Each structure stands twice: as C-alpha cells, then as structure tokens.
Amino acid sequence: MKDIFQGRKRGLQGMAGTRDYGKMTPLQAAGCVRKKRRDLKESRRLTDTPGAIVAAARKLFEARGAQATSIAAIAREANVTRELVYYHFTNRNGLIEAVIDDYVEDLVESVIVWNEARVFGDTPGSLKKCIQTFRHSLYDSAGRPRPVIAVLEELGVRDAFDVRATRETADCLANHIAREYAAYHRIEIELVHEMFCVAIFGLVGLVKMNPQMEDDVLMKVIEQTLRLDMVPIGKGEE
C-alpha cells in the first residue's frame, strides 16, 4: 500500500514537470475546463517540490499581493532556486495557474470532506453542515472574505474563477453525491447538474450581499431550490 501511495506522489510530481504550465493567462486559467474527476478519491493537488512552491506562492500572494510578489521571493519561501520554480512552471503565469488550480481544489475538497463526514439518512444535518462548510471556505467567523478573494480580484479573475469553481463543485455533487442520494430518495428535479450550479451561485450571491445571513435561511433556499426530501431515513431502511 505504501508503495502505491509513493508511486502516486511521484506521478503527481511528474505532472508538474510535464504539464505545460505557463501557456495560459490568469484569466484563461481561472476559466479553463478540466476533465471531470474519476471518483472522490482522486486528488489534483501538486505534491513534493511543486506543491511546496505553490504553497509558498499562495502564502505570499495573500500576504503581499500577487503583483508585489517576485519569483525570487517565492523561491526563498519554498527554499528552492529560481531555476527550479521556472523548471516546474515555465513563467509567472504558469505559477499563477497552479495557484488557481489549488484554490479550486480547496473548494472541491471541502465538499469531499463534508461528504465523508455525513451521517446516513440525516438530510437536515447534512445540509446544515454543508452550509457551514460553504461559508467557512469563503468567509471567516466575522464574515470577512478570506484572502483568496483579494488575490482573485487583484488578478481580475474573480468572475471566471467563480464559474470554474461552481462547475467543478457541481460536477462533484451531481456525479457522485447525488447518485448516493438517489439510491434512497426520489430526485424531484430535472437537470441535476444545472440546478446544483444555480444553488451554488445563489449561495455565493446571497452571502456576498449579506455575509451575516443566517444558516437556517440559506438551508431553506437550498432545500427549496433542489426540492430535497428532508425526512430522515432510519438505519433499518439502509
């Protein structure tokens, strides 16, 4: 098992060396369409040296701003040479592309973690925790936007990123989690993927207008939008 895991890590590291990071502008990277993930166990995080470089770039972008952060500063933070940064990411845009990918993965992974922690049959409890996960991923406990928002706005890619993040999150929900729900409930809506997109965009817009909006209100919006069956399922019905 350990050998398989190590092999997977090497494969992800190889992706950074072979993928053509640097051919997209930040706007193109924020709006690109990736293949749907095969299953919920698939991770798209870069690991090892590429992952350390991305983590360093994120830290400095969020503290100083993307434009004020040099490749040399990122290399120092990651404890690598500038040449190694360019080896993995070709140019500044390539590094920004990788950071944007990592931001998307933050949101999708938060959904995957939420899904793994769900209690079978407890639709109201699961929905409440989903709303909490959504809010936590974008805002702190005081309702302030997390630093990622400022980075995306500085780069001028916030709208494109919102579309891409919504698409990938909706893919995760519709292609995997909704299938599990359908095994025990009747799905009352058509165009499941599209309705998830509507629900996610709706949440983002509502909380953007009023960061203090109560979770119970957001839950009701999602319940009505997706026409969820909120009646808990007993364990004997598994």
Image (cartoon, rainbow, N blue to C red):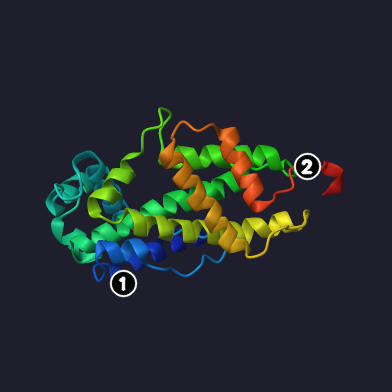
User: Residue drawn 57% across and 42% down?
Assistant: 130
Q: Where's residue 63, x and y in %? A: 23, 39
Q: Residue at x 52, y 65 (%)?
A: 37
Name the residue type under label 2. Answer: Val
In-front residue for pair 185/234: 185
Q: Judge left or right: residue 25 versus residue 238.
A: left
* Image coords of residue 25 (percent x, y): 24, 66
Looking at marks 2 and 1 on the same chain, the residue that comes earlier in the sequence is marked by 1
- Farthest right residue? 236
Side of 227 relative to 143 (left or right): right
- Report the side of 74 relative to 214 (left or right): left
Q: Circles 2 and 1: CB distance less than 8 Å?
A: no
The residue tagged with tag 1: helix, strand or loop? helix
Determine whether 87 is above or below 203 in the image.
Answer: below
Residue labelled with disc 1: 18
The answer to which of 153 and 73 lies nearer the viewer is 153
Residue in front for this viewpoint, 63 or 56: 63
Residue shown at 77% from the left, 57% from the top: 186
Query: What residue is disc 2 on?
Result: 231
